[in-house]
Every structure is written in structure tokens, then in C-alpha cells.
Image (spheres, helix red, strand yellow):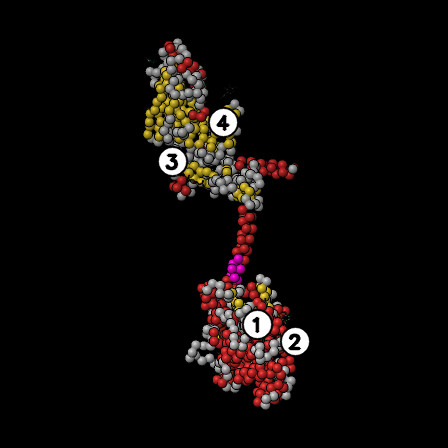
Amino acid sequence: MILIILRFLLLVWLAKTEAAANIALPGCRDSCGGLSIPYPFGIGSNCSLSEDFEISCNTINRSSTPYNGDLEILDISLSLGQARIMSPISYQCYNSKTKKIQYTDYWVGIPPFRFNHEKNKFVVIGCDTLAYINFTIDQNSYLGGCVSGCDSLKSLTDGSCSGIGCCQTTIPTGTNNINLWFDEKFNNSGPEVYNFSPCSYAMLVEEKGFHFNTGYITSSQLQYQSMSVVIDWAVGNTTCDVARTSKSFACKSKYSNCSDSNSGPGYICNCLHGYQGNPYLQGGCIDIDECATPNPCSKPGKCHNLQGGYRCSCPLGWRNKHNNLQECKLNLAPLVGTCAGIVALCFLGLTTYVALERRNLSKIKEKYIQQHGGWILLEEIKSKQGFGFTIFTKQQIEQATNDFDSENIIGYGGQGTVYKGTLRDQIFAIKKCKIINESKKGEFGKEMLILSQINHKNIVKLLGCCLEVEVPILVYEFVSNGTLFQYIHNKKQGSCISLATRLRIAQESAEALAYLHFSASPPIFHGDVKSANILLDQNYTAKVSDFGASILALTEGEQFVSFVQGTRGYLDPEYMQSCQLTEKSDVYSFGMVLLELLTRKPVIDFDAPEKEMSLCSRFLSAMKEKKMQNLLDDEINNEDDMQIIMEVAELAKQCLNIKGDERPTIKEVAEELDRIRKLKFHPWGQVYTAEEMEILHSQESHNNNIVIDHSNYFSMDKEAEEIIDVGRVV
Ligand SMILES: *[C@@H]1O[C@H](CO)[C@@H](O)[C@H](O)[C@H]1NC(C)=O
Ligand SMILES: *[C@@H]1O[C@H](CO)[C@@H](O)[C@H](O)[C@H]1NC(C)=O
Ligand SMILES: *[C@@H]1O[C@H](CO)[C@@H](O)[C@H](O)[C@H]1NC(C)=O
Ligand SMILES: *[C@@H]1O[C@H](CO)[C@@H](O)[C@H](O)[C@H]1NC(C)=O
Ligand SMILES: *[C@@H]1O[C@H](CO)[C@@H](O)[C@H](O)[C@H]1NC(C)=O
Ligand SMILES: *[C@@H]1O[C@H](CO)[C@@H](O)[C@H](O)[C@H]1NC(C)=O
Ligand SMILES: *[C@@H]1O[C@H](CO)[C@@H](O)[C@H](O)[C@H]1NC(C)=O
Ligand SMILES: *[C@@H]1O[C@H](CO)[C@@H](O)[C@H](O)[C@H]1NC(C)=O
Ligand SMILES: *[C@@H]1O[C@H](CO)[C@@H](O)[C@H](O)[C@H]1NC(C)=O
Ligand SMILES: *[C@@H]1O[C@H](CO)[C@@H](O)[C@H](O)[C@H]1NC(C)=O
């Protein structure tokens, strides 16, 4: 607290000394009679700018009064370039006793200074008065006058100077001499006047300091008084622009400004805004410490003094008011703005990144779709709404297979890995192809389109695919009970497979292949027919699968040459030589499947001696030697079925003909199998198994159309046939 007071006092003291120190020239008195006399005025010679500004400090009756010439100075204003002086009053009084007029005329001259034309008025007081004023401006003179009259005191009003008892008029700019006198014919000599108003007065007076008082009319005392008048002073007799070039330019302070006088030649100096002091002195203008007292900054602003000004700094979260820099207003905008900006930047960056990443991703997807010729497929799907083929997204596939979890692998096909996938409570077999041959990539979409249109009960249905990934992913219907290969060769299960079932599976497979060869457009050659590619559903219905190696039969004339694909043991030897896959290649492979069904032996037995390794050659030699029975699976090796088995064996032999041309078509094979199956069920030829009898009876009781009759056998409609199939469960 004490510190604050001390500091305050120090500041006050400093301010005082500084201000005081710089008013007059060094070594000169700076005041007279309590009035400060700033330079260019000065007391005594060599203390003022020129003689015009010289002040004499006269001491009368112990009180000092400053005079400029014989004019008493009341005050001096540096900033306005003005001063106030005392000016005498002219009077004219009528002495009723002597009948004489007593008067004084005044001449007041103040060159080179001038009477201020705005603040001063020529005032005439009296009830029978006409006074003249002679203004001299430079060498020219102008005459002015004012008439004042009144009948009685009652007509007068205090404060009103408008012709009754008092009149006033303005003076022209630049007046530096005035001469006042009265017209003698207006001399208050009329008894109705001099009784109450013996005197008239005329004066040049500062309007602000003059108030008309009715007492002036009746009094004769005003003649001894004087009135204040405002004068304009200026330095030199040139404009600023001219003066600036001169050595004697009066605006000595660095922080001063010069302005031309309003009322005539000369100029005045002023300290620049934010500075105070005496601009006529070197170093006279001192920076105003605006922050001293009182603090111009409203709370919570903090004041900082600057050269020629100050600054109000606002605390964090506030800012200067736009129109009033002294005030601070709450402004969280920069704070909030900065935060928001950072957040926005982060957000922008993130979204841009995500967008880029997404674009990148979709670009990659598009690339793959493009590579796989997927656009054809997509367009086709669009045009044929709902033909049961779906384009799955990568996300769906990943979700279904639990990101290709190895636990979901259900098989390794020749062309890729097969996963079990669940999507929307539906089970699919999802095949992830191995990287396909670049040159064939473009064909993929087209192939998908063709394969998707295949709809046969004994062919695994292709439900959709996914093109967004590097390698194509195919989505098939899920066939639950494994492959025919597993069924035949997994003897651990100890399952007994009846001849009827074997024949049915064989026929179903053959029909599927026949469909591919003859009904599909364009024809499709499977290329990898084998027991492992024949799947079984819950009812042990055969479903041919894996078109991986399948090569679409090209339109006529086009030859397709490729490297040989397929599985050892099933491969058509002719195909191996020519590298040309034909429909008969499938027939050969199917012959091997038939052999598997009959013998339940592997197509290549690696444990057997070299001569007996190939099932095919063993079979062919067995056929030659008519020792087929030795090869047959024990389960079906009975005399009753031997005729049928031999017919199947004969069919297999035809299929396995080394010459493709001599093999039957798969359609013929299917028809032959059909015939053989019906032969087995011939009511008069063979004996039904108990199981089959039962089924047939139940069918009969349900459907009277089915007549188990040899003559009707070949006219039995397909529907009935299917019913028989469906009903048979091994
Ligand atoms: C004023 O200055 C002049 C010349 O600069 C000098 O001769 C004169 O004595 C001075 N007068 C006073 C009163 O100092
Ligand atoms: C000075 O004082 C005396 C007596 O006090 C007075 O008579 C005289 O008029 C005064 N002079 C002026 C100029 O005021
Ligand atoms: C006005 O004053 C000037 C100079 O003092 C003088 O020459 C002139 O005659 C006067 N004019 C009148 C009308 O008195
Ligand atoms: C006063 O004025 C009257 C006219 O108003 C005039 O007749 C008279 O002579 C004047 N008196 C003097 C002393 O001039
Ligand atoms: C201006 O003032 C100077 C001296 O102060 C003088 O010599 C000069 O003649 C004046 N010029 C005018 C136009 O009054
Ligand atoms: C300086 O004076 C000139 C002329 O009077 C004026 O226009 C200008 O604004 C002044 N400059 C400052 C900074 O006071
Ligand atoms: C876009 O994918 C390419 C690879 O295809 C990769 O090199 C690149 O970094 C990815 N750009 C972004 C922004 O993820
Ligand atoms: C792709 O197929 C072409 C012939 O269609 C063949 O020349 C090429 O070797 C194959 N490339 C691969 C990687 O299988
Ligand atoms: C085939 O399905 C039946 C049920 O329909 C089941 O009992 C049997 O184990 C399945 N066999 C295989 C090999 O999946
Ligand atoms: C198996 O047969 C039963 C009865 O005929 C049928 O309801 C079921 O849909 C069949 N299952 C399959 C997978 O075809």
C-alpha cells in the first residue's frame, strides 16, 4: 500500500517537474503573478522569440502582473495560439448640470497579433447611443457601428444584448487595430434618458466574459473598468510550409506539428497527439504517460504507455473493443477459434485421409473388378434382376469365413481353398481361388456369368462371387455330406453302400456332366471329373462340383490349347498327349469314377506293386481275362447283381477306351446307366431289396401314376423318377 502511494507521489512529482521545466527558455522566468509564461513568450529580452512576445512583469502594490506592451495579459494558450488581454472601455457620459458630454475614445492596436473574430464582440451599451468602430486589417480600415436605445429601464432584460439598451456586432477576421468613438448627436442629453442613463459605453469584449446587466445602464462606474479580449497570436508572417524551410522555424520540438494561423499570417506549433509540453522548445514535447492516473484502460485491460500513445492489453480470452480500444470485451473467439481450428484441422486431416484411403480401397477394388472382367457380370446382373447370383462384398466374405479362419477350411480344391462360411444363417461353401493366370483374368467375369446360369439339381450351384479381392472368390451352395471319394474310400465308417445307391450316384453324376456338355451354352467341359469332385448332400444325392479346371468349350473353329490340368489317375491319356480337352476327356474320367464305385479301390494304389498300381490297367486286364469279380467290392459282389455289374463294367470299359472318338458321349453313358438302373428294378427280372420294396409301395399308395411295369418303364415320367430318387436313403 505504502509502495503504491509512494509511487503515485513520485509520478505526480515527476509530471510536475517535467511540465514545469520545459515551459520557458532555460534561465528565464517562466511565470509572472501566478501566470505561467511559456515560450515563445518570455519575460525580459532574450527570453522570448521576438519583441512581439516579450512580457514585462510589473509589480504594483506587491502583486505582479504580466504586460505585453501596455496590455495586461490574463492568460496565454500555447495550443490555441491565443491569449487574453485586458481592454479598456470607451464611454460617453452626459453631465446634466454642466450640459457637457464627457467621453473617452480608445485606440487599441496589437499588431502583429489580431483580435479573435469568433470569440470577441463589439458591444455598445446605452439608451441613446451610436458608437463606431474602425477596424484596421493590415493597412486597410473598415468602419462598423452599433445603435442602442431604450425608453425605460422596464424595457431592458438582463443577459439580452439585442438592440435595447445593448447592441453587439461581430468583427472581421484579422483585425489588429480598433478605434472606438461615439456619435455626439446621440448623447443621452434628453431628460427622459439622462435621468436614469447618463452614460453610454462601447467596447470590444470576449463574448463569453460579458453578460449584459441592466445595472450597466444606470451605472457610471463601468468607465473605470476593463474587459477581457481574446487575441490570436502567431509566429512569423509566413505559412508553415515556408517557415519549415527556414532556420528560425519555431516548432523546435521533434514531436511538434505546425499549423497556419486561422486569422492571418504566421503559424503556431503544437505537440503531436500523445505528447504535451512546449512545442517551441527543443525537447519540449514530452510523451504523455497515459497510464499514470487514472488508468485509461477499463478493467481488466492493462495499460502500456507508448511513445505518443498507449495500448490497453486485454487478458487471454478478452480483446479490445473495435470502436473503443480502452475497453476490453470478453472474447473467447481466438481461444475457441484456435481450439476449433485445431480440431477442425485434425478432423479435416482425418477425413481426407479416410477419404483417400477409401478412394484408394475402392480403386483397388475397382482394379480387381476390372481385372476380373467383372463389369460384364455386374451389368448382366443389373439387367437380369434376381437371377439368383449375388456379388458379395469383400466384407461379407470376410465376415462369413471369420476372416478366412483356417478352422473353416473344408477342402483344398485343385484351384483353391474351400471354406465353410455362414452369412445370414445360411451356410455357403466359399472357394478362394489360387492366383489365376493373368491372361485368363479377364475371362473370369464372363465365366462367372455362364456358370451362374447353370441350374441343375446334380450340380453344385454357384450362388455368387466376390470380385473386390485380388483373387476371385466363388460362393457355392454348401453340400453337407462330403465327397464321393470320402464316402467310397473312408472304410472306417464301415458304411455299406448298396449297388442301387452306387448306380444312382453314377447316373446323377453322368446326368450332371451331360447337362454341362449338351445343355449348357456354351458347352462346359469339366476337366477334372473325379470322385473327390462329386459331393453328396444329406440324402446322398450327387452334386458335381469344382469347375476350376473347367474350360468353356470355345466357339467352333477356336482351338484351345493349354497345359494339362486334372488329377492323376483320372486323366484322359489322349488329353495328356494332345493337350486338348474334349468332352471325351470327361467321359474317360467318369469311367474311372465308375470303376471306383464298382471296386471301392483307389484309382492309383501307391501301396500296390507297380504293375497293379493303376486301377484302370488292372480293370482292363481283368476284363480281358474275364476275372472282373476279383476286382469288385465285396459288398456288391453277389451273383444276383452280376449281370448289372457286368453291364456297368462294360460301360466303364467303353469310357476308358484309349481312343476318345470311340468312347460314348456322356449323354449315352447317362442313358445307359439309366437303363441299367431300371433293369435292376425290373420286377420280373430281379428281386427288390426289402428297402426298395418298401419305398416303391409307399410311392404306389401315394401316387397311382407310377406303374412298375416293364412295358411302361421307358415312358415313366421324370417326376416319378425323381420321387423314387428322393425317397431312397441309404
Ligand atoms: C541578449 O542577447 C544579445 C545577443 O545575443 C546580447 O548582446 C544581450 O546582452 C542579451 N541581453 C540580455 C539581457 O541578456
Ligand atoms: C496601491 O495601494 C494603495 C494603497 O493600498 C492604493 O491607494 C493604490 O491605488 C494602489 N495602486 C494600484 C495601482 O492599485
Ligand atoms: C480608421 O483608422 C485609420 C487608421 O487608424 C484612419 O486612417 C482612418 O481614417 C480611420 N477611419 C475613420 C472613418 O475614422
Ligand atoms: C446633444 O444632442 C443634441 C441632439 O440630439 C444636440 O442638439 C446637442 O447639441 C448635443 N449636445 C452636444 C453637447 O453636442
Ligand atoms: C516578415 O517578417 C520579417 C521579420 O520578422 C520581415 O523582415 C518581413 O518584411 C516580413 N514580411 C512581411 C510580408 O510582412
Ligand atoms: C499537423 O498539422 C496539420 C495542419 O494543421 C494537420 O492537418 C495535421 O493533422 C497535424 N498532424 C498531427 C499529427 O497533429
Ligand atoms: C494406396 O494404395 C497403394 C497401393 O495400392 C499404397 O502404396 C498407398 O500407400 C495407398 N495410399 C494411401 C493414402 O493409403
Ligand atoms: C497363363 O496362360 C498362358 C497361356 O494362356 C501361358 O502361356 C502362361 O504360362 C500362363 N501363366 C501362368 C502363370 O500360369
Ligand atoms: C451324412 O449325413 C448324415 C445325416 O444326414 C450323417 O449322419 C452322416 O454322418 C453324414 N456323413 C458324412 C460323411 O458327413
Ligand atoms: C433330403 O430328403 C428329404 C426328404 O425327401 C428332403 O425333405 C430334404 O430337403 C432333402 N435334403 C436335401 C439337402 O436335398
Q: In this view, does 133 lie above or below 489?
A: above
Q: Which of marks 2 and 4 is nearer the N terminus?
A: 4
Q: Which of marks 3 and 4 is nearer the N terminus?
A: 4
Residue 648 visible in image = yes
Mark 2 or 1, closer to the camera: 1
Residue 439 visible in image = no
Mark 2 or 3, closer to the camera: 2
User: Is residue 354 in the magenta section?
Assistant: yes
Left or right: where does residue 730 sit relative to residue 192? Answer: right
Placement of the C terminus among the 4 image quadrants? bottom right
Label 3 CB sits under 8 Å from any ligand 5 atom: yes
Q: Identify the amino acid type marked 1.
A: Asp
Kindly identify which numbered label has been placed on residue 65.
4
The residue range painted magenta reads 351-358
Q: Which of marks 2 and 3 is nearer the N terminus?
A: 3
Residue identified by numbered label 2: 495
